Amino acid sequence: MQLAKRLISGVDIWLNTPTRPLEASGTSGEKAEMNGVLNLSVLDGWWYEGYREGAGWALTEKRTYDNQQYQDQLDAATIYSMLENEIIPLYYDKNSKKYSPKWIQYIKNSTAQIMPHYTTKRMFDDYTHKFYNKLANRSGSLVKNDFAKAKELAAWKEEVASNWDSMEVVSSNFEGNIHTGLTIGDVVKATIVIDKHKIQGDIGAEVVKMQSNPLTDQEIISVHRMRTDKKEGSKIYCSVEINAHEAGAFKYGIRIFPDNKDLPHRMDFAYVKWVNF
């Protein structure tokens, strides 16, 4: 902390350019941020979420070359270009009072738009509202009336687990150009008929849509919950319409799962059945 105090107090730009995507976090940049220092970093670690246009500077998270030596050379040239043509001229664009109003505006933007998202108060607020309060309320509901809700959930899980393999996919279908490729505005409709057989509790279904990103070799995934159109005995009829907001070829699958409003989250009871296309 003593070293950081000396470093940060004399800095106008916090230059942090790790090899993407190897930045563990970037807390030094957050610390600089809290002290009015502007950041110039690659969009990795905290800066991937923290960067705001007009409140700092960023190198793209995308790679141009697979060869790291070539990528390093390109990144270095980009950094020098940003410093020479944008950042340094902005810093020295001083008025009659010997300071740069535009530079000060960057600092104000940084302080107003980025800093509040990385305070300890924001962290405590997130823990409180997203976790602690919800867990406290859930704990109260589970222990109420001699653990009635906990016993009910345990019995439901046992029943579903015992009969999960008896479930049958009667039919499933996709309407749309899912194999030849979609254009923006196309509509894909998915339907499925499920026979629960011995399962007494509710089950849900959703479409998982995947597309490969050739630049990063990663899967882009979106999930679309299917609605229950009708029930006939042990059979459930589900469907969903998906509007194509991107063009291209996609992979589709339907994921079936136990459904209970009293579960805290899906992974609390992670049974699943896939129907691939």
Image (cartoon, rainbow, N blue to C red):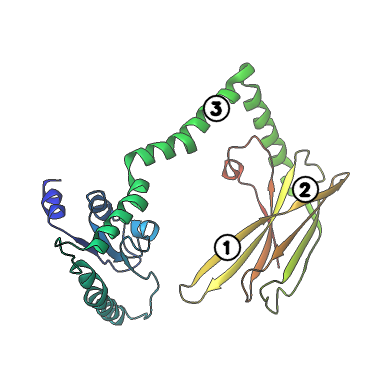
Q: Secondary structure at mark 3?
A: helix
| Residue 43 in picture, x, y percent from top left | 36, 65
| Residue 2 in picture, x, y percent from top left | 11, 46
The residue carrying pointer 2 sits among few (fewer than 14), some (14 to 19) or many (20 or more) residues within 10 Å by Cα, namely few
Residue displayed at 35% across by 38% down = 121
Is residue 135 shown left or right of residue 36? right
Q: Is residue 225 visible?
A: yes
Q: Secondary structure at mark 2?
A: helix
Q: Earlier in the sequence, mark 2 or mark 3?
A: 3
Q: Earlier in the sequence, mark 1 or mark 2?
A: 2
User: Looking at the image, is mark 1 or mark 2 nearer the viewer?
Assistant: 1
| Label 3, label 1: how far apart the Cα atoms are | 32 Å
Q: Secondary structure at mark 1?
A: strand
Closer to the camera in the image, 276 or 92: 92
Name the quadrant containing residue 139.
Answer: top right
Name the quadrant containing residue 252.
Answer: bottom right
Determine whether label 2 and label 3 are within 8 Å by CB. Answer: no
Which residue is identified by label 2?
166
Q: Earlier in the sequence, mark 3 or mark 1?
A: 3
Is residue 214 shown left or right of residue 29? right
| Label 1, label 2: how far apart the Cα atoms are | 29 Å
| Label 2, label 3: how far apart the Cα atoms are | 35 Å
Which residue is identified by label 3?
137
| Residue 224 in picture, x, y percent from top left | 66, 57
Residue displayed at 69% across by 71% down = 185
Which residue is identified by label 1?
221
Is residue 208 shown left or right of residue 104? right
